Image: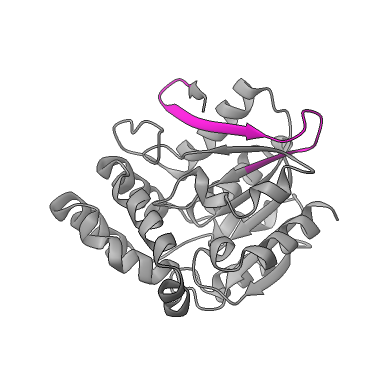
Amino acid sequence: MPHADLAHVRLNYRVDGPPHAPWLTLSNSLGTDLDMWAPQVPALIERFRVLRYDVRGHGASSAPPPPYSIATLANDVVALLDLVGVERTHFCGLSMGGMTGIRLALASPDRIDRLVLASTGAQIGSADAWNARISAVHTTGLASIADTIMERWFTRAFREANPREMARFKDVLVKCAPDGYAACCAAVRDYDARPELAAIRAPTLAIAGTHDPGTPPSSLRAIVERVQGARFVELDASHLSNVEQPTDFLAALIGHLDA
């Protein structure tokens, strides 16, 4: 896969789909990589030109020294779009990727067509919880939190029925650059777009997982209440709703982008 050498980071990315189809950019969650979107890609590339990338500190992208912010992550996307030659794109982000989408819709509205925000929030978690996770990563490494993260990402029933998937996602998490992962945790900790949400003008869909402990349905409903015309879908899933309910997630995504 190609790499984009941007001003302060090297991003691993991939483009698939017909050359003249509408662009769709997918942004992964904290602790995953661009393959998080594998369940949806075969169907999506039949009608979209799909751009996926590893967020800095994740996958095969580089992990520049901190600090990071959600604005930093959004600026990475804009720079990648410029390099690839994308003027406007639909954008779908999950969790941290959803925060990036919020920032893009606010700061670069001319680049975003339709917006999908999945398992995310305009503000996520408490500073104390994020600081505890950052401390654990610095002190004992990513492997020490991996089992807990799997329990937050997937329901028990899904974990027990899909041990190979659990092993794959755990491996991707553990292979993240520890400093990059921790810096992304700090970026999520410090972001609060709640006062700005009403300024979003991109047609927006919010997708929640019923059993998501980190970004529960109330987090997504709060976005819908503030973004004019936004729609809400709830899936029987935990945090990585596109993995746990791939067919329903895809149907909601395509339904919104094709509206």
Q: Position of residue 48 (x, y in %)?
A: 76, 41
The color scheme shown is one colour
Quadrant in which residue 250 is drawn: bottom right
Please tell me whether residue 252 is drawn above or below residue 159 in the rendered image. Answer: above
Pick whichever, 224 or 36, lies toward us. Answer: 36
Q: Is residue 83 magenta?
A: no
The residue lying furthest to the left in this view is: 139
Q: Which residue: 70% across, 28% down? A: 86
Q: Give, as a single range, the part of the protein colored magenta.
A: 5-25
Q: Classify residue 46 as left or right of residue 259.
A: left
The residue lying furthest to the right in this view is: 259
Q: Which residue: 40% across, 34% down? A: 60
Q: Position of residue 202 (x, y in %)?
A: 74, 49
Please tell me whether residue 202 is drawn above or below residue 63 in the rendered image. Answer: below
Q: Classify residue 93 as left or right of residue 21.
A: left
Q: Which corner quadrant holds the C terminus?
A: bottom right
Q: Position of residue 66 (x, y in %)?
A: 30, 36
Q: Which residue: 56% across, 78% down? A: 210
Q: Position of residue 100 (x, y in %)?
A: 54, 46
Quadrant in which residue 183 is drawn: top left
Please tell me whether residue 203 is drawn above or below residue 240 in the rendered image. Answer: above
Q: Is residue 21 magenta?
A: yes
**Residue 126 seen anywhere in this rendered image of the structure:** no
Please tell me whether residue 231 is drawn above or below residue 8 in the rendered image. Answer: below
Number of marks drawn? 0
**Residue 105 seen anywhere in this rendered image of the structure:** yes
